[in-house]
Image: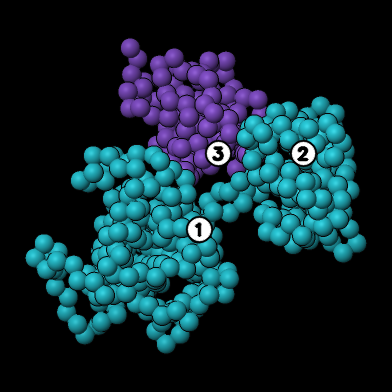
Chain colours: A purple, B cyan
Amino acid sequence: MKDTIKVTIIDREETHHTLDAPTDMNLNMMELCKMYELPVEGTCGGMALCASCQVYLESDTSLPEQSEAELTMLDQAFHVKDNSRLGCQIRITEAMDGIVLRLAPR
Amino acid sequence: MIETDLLIIGAGPCGLFTVFEAGLLKMRCHLIDSLPTPGGQLTEIYPKKPIYDIPGFPVVNAGELVDNLMKQIEVFKPAFTLGETAQTIDEAEGKFIVTTNKGTQHQAPVVLIAGGLGVFEPRKPPIENLEQFEDKGVEYIIRDPELYRDKKVVISGGGDSALDWTIYLMENKIVKNLVLVHRRTSFRGHLDSVQKVMDMAQAGKIELITESEVTGINAGPHGQVASVVINHATHGNITKETDHFIPLFGLTPSLGPIADWGLELEKGAVKVNTFDYSTNRPGIYAVGDINTYPGKLKLILCGFHEGTLAVQSAFARIHPNKKNVLKYTTVNGVNGF
């Protein structure tokens, strides 16, 4: 069991941040970004209601399927692409080691 | 002019509980909220969600907590201005005058901002110069359908509101023609609304353009909307003549008008002194999710504490010559107005 994995976040200035992400704290990617003070707002607190934590999945990491709530929110968001996800809906697990996410424009 | 002791901006849980603590000190409260019902996020966003960290409640639904808070403060007869947004603040003779977007005026010696996430405002698509067309053909909310009588209208969005308005404007034969633009091929709205819109498109009553986004607006001779540029994911751009462009992408919270109240801000929140949760403007306090300070936690229970301390300071401000002694409700009970 790995208790930390590597998560790479590419910010809006193209800077790559490779972060140590604990897998035993029930964290999601939005919370991880906030923990490292990356420019992610997470206005709604993680309820898939604001899309301020939208990211693009840039690695071939396989993620759990998106919930209805996440898809509904992304439907109302902007800059959405096929690989768009809400950071707050990605709960960090060991299987995500090496994942690369890019922050969507504000 | 509505007059009160403590004017509270925001009727979420922190604003509501502050009424109780102010009431114990014999200060009357009036609350303003942009939403039509009290409760803030709890009522608007997650009324059915359980909350587990309210002391004394192993679990309580958000809506139930709001009902309980309303019951708890009833004895202090708070008054409300609901469905109006606190817009401007002026200071005269030691009192504040807060005016809403609908012109309602409120006067109080102390203002307490319990604004939570801020004001819920329409989500605006990232189109260059979009704001220059506001009131010139671009509307984010349909207030009066008659505005569109015999007009050409482009709606964009794929949620219930885009679908419902498309159906309403067509079924009531209001608009001259209607183009609905949606980013994807399928809709996530209610099934029967989706079916209705699909049928209307099939019958040629509306023009449905999917896998597309409105990416530009062209101005007419008086600066009003003349046409929009619609970008298709694979086919490129087309231009559609229109009188109105109505992007319907739901609501998103933002700090709103208080951003211009001369308060010191940090990362979209109001900076406060944790001694009494006062802002940089004497007489204005900020509690709950809208404030920030070192160690801030956005929790309802912390907001309750903040409001409690803020009203102590507000009391000293309103009654500079009176001494205040902490009284326990267990000993004294609750004596309402």
Rendered location of residue B241, percent (x, y): 89, 48
Q: Residue at x 57, y 24 (%)?
A: A57
Residue B70: quadrant of the picture: bottom left
Q: Chain of mark 1?
A: B
Where is the N terminus of chain A found, in terms of image quarters? Answer: top left
Rendered location of residue B209, percent (x, y): 80, 35
Rendered location of residue B125, percent (x, y): 68, 46
Whole-angstrom CA distance, mark 1 to mark 3, is 21 Å
SS category of the residue bearing label 3 = loop
SS category of the residue bearing label 1 = loop
Question: Residue B35 — which label?
Answer: 1
Answer yes or no: is residue B215 visible.
no
Q: Residue at x 48, y 82 (%)?
A: B1
Question: Residue A51 — which label?
Answer: 3
Please name which of the two marks, 2 or 3, marks the residue nearer to the observer.
2
Q: Which residue type does callout 1 highlight?
A: Leu
Please name which of the two marks, 1 or 3, marks the residue nearer to the observer.
1
Labels 1 and 3 positioned on one and the same chain: no
State the residue lying farthest toward the front: B172
* Front one among B274 and A78: A78
Rendered location of residue B257, percent (x, y): 54, 64
Question: Residue B181 — which label?
Answer: 2
Answer yes or no: is residue B75 visible.
yes
Residue A76: quadrant of the picture: top right
**Mark 3 burial class by Cα count in 10 Å: few <14, some 14-19, many 20+:** many
Residue B287: quadrant of the picture: bottom left
Q: Residue at x 42, y 35 (%)?
A: A31
